Amino acid sequence: MTALPRRGVLKSLPLAAGAVLTAPTPGAHAVSRRRDDHVFPEPETRRTPPRTNSLTTQLTVGFSEQALPGVGTIRTRTYEGAIPGPTFRVRPGDGLEITHVNALPPDTAAPHHDINIPHGFNTFNLHTHGMHVDPTGDADNVFRAFEPAEVPGNTTSHRSSLTVPAGHPAGTYWYHPHHHGSSATQVLNGMAGVIVVEGDIDEVPEIAAARDIVVCVNELRLDHGQVPDLTSDDAFQGIAPTFLINGAKNPVLTIAPGEVQRWRVVHAGALTPLSLRLDGHTMHQIAQDGITFMAPVASSTVALPMGGRADVLVRGGEPGTYELITDGVDRPLMTLVVTGPARDMSLPADLPGRPTSLPAPTRSRHVAFRSFSNVFSGDFPNAYRILGDGETPHADASAGPRDLAWGRFAPDYVNHRVRLGEVEEWTVANDSHSHPHHPFHLHTNHFLVTAVNGRPLATPVWHDTISIPPRGTITFRLLAEDFVGRSMLHCHQLQHEDQGMMQIIEYVR
Ligand SMILES: [Cu+2]
């Protein structure tokens, strides 16, 4: 039911001397890299082959050159020479085996003595954002480092091996690098891709009939066709965001009057929250962060923090041209053209959603995201900290005044131990003096948001990422399940994360 994947890519060139970007992995779908302005671009799709239960694939990371419609030629770090990287489609119970080839040049930015000074811009790893999978070993383990070769032109190879649990929710997830010190730089280069877990929601008749469309929003910070490395706190300041949808600026999607489409909107950005509106249309949200609602929720605005996803149904209105816009960006992100013979498709009334209640909590925690401007000397003068219960005593005592170095990420300090099967209530505050946008993201388990600014929600909502209102709070219940080991919580303004706004949460039995 989906159009053949095509990409708006003219060419993909390795720029690291001798680093060869490989052809698509054997077994993956053939890819058309021919540019076609009349077809809405969609990322290449790689799915679990029929009659197997494992998707085996390769992701090569290198500098590549792409000519993007409406943007020009850019040179950035990419997965497989494309923005976004390929979409993976898997089912509950599947394995996901990825060979990562690091074809980036040697790292020149050696680690600083302070781990919270950005570094290692050619070192990456893999995070499967939102997925309920093992956070240790070769799975969704963000403590790993896939370093480049020391000799220019050589590559290194690394492996991820994940199992999607049999009961994993069907929905929309994504992957991106999560190496502390380089995650903001790499995501702003366009390193991100979508993961679709197929399952029950796809069999709802109205949804099965709808065209299934990935809408991946990448946010680049382009300066003369390149994205600067985060070598100072203001490296991206003064560079306007370039938002791409599936690698194109303002692509055109068509829909028939009365046709229902399902859009999997992924905010694969790092710095700027989205507030999405579609002219002349209501969006009927069916899932948040990969978790299906009990029934569609009609809204005129869908707010997505960096890292968040919303699955929405859109029903084509009167013939005409409409824009998908977000606050603070002059150009439309995407244009929707309603055209062609009318159809009479309907929206579902009920969905196989996850129940929005949890038992009463037996313990509580309070944490606060707090940032200050211009408190340190050097290129990184701002302090990005997480305080409250479990705060890190110090990440680096020599980084500045003890009170402001306090509360920043330390790779060996466990901030929270959370017991499987025990319901907790967390309150997360944003009491920053500066930098208003702090999306809270938890790895491995979703959480059930029950209140914002202390006001209970009529219907709690499952999230893995949520904006903490400036000077406000969110309250959620957490029931950790299935997986033990060290995992992460952090700010998904990734520049803040690279500079220390992150904690370790250990799930224990
Ligand atoms: Cu932040």
Image (cartoon, rainbow, N blue to C red):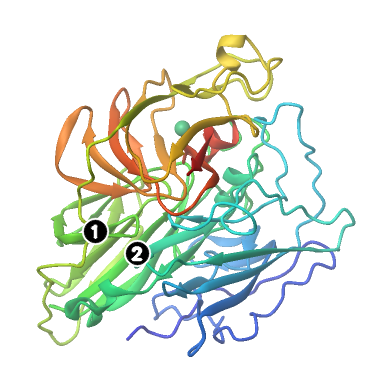
On screen, residue 330 versus residue 482, left or right, reads left
Please, what is the three-letter code of the amino acid marked with disc 1?
A: Arg
Residue placed under numbered mark 1 in the picture: 354
Horizontal and vertical percent for residue 388?
43, 20
**Placement of 444 over or under 387, stated as above or below:** below
Please, what is the three-letter code of the amino acid marked with disc 2?
A: Pro
Outermost residue toward the bottom in this view: 51
**Placement of 5 over or under 112, stated as above or below:** below
- Can you tell which quarter of the image residue 401 is in? top right
Q: Which quarter of the figure is the N terminus placed in? A: bottom left
Question: Nearest the camera: 29 or 243?
Answer: 29
**Which label was assigned to residue 3?**
none
Horizontal and vertical percent for residue 215?
38, 65
Outermost residue toward the right in this view: 151
- Which residue shows up at 20% across the image and 77% down it? 204
Q: Check whether the beta carbons of the residues at disc 2 and disc 1 lie within 8 A of each other.
A: yes
Horizontal and vertical percent for residue 257?
14, 78
Outermost residue toward the front in this view: 509
On screen, residue 166 versus residue 14, left or right, reads left
- Can you tell which quarter of the image residue 287 is in? bottom left
Q: Disc 2 on helix, strand or loop?
A: loop
Query: Can residue 178 be seen at all in this image of the molecule?
Result: yes
Of label 2 and label 1, which has the lower sequence position?
2
- Which residue shows up at 67% across the image and 30% down it? 117
Horizontal and vertical percent for residue 339?
20, 80
- Which residue shows up at 86% across the image and 63% down it? 153
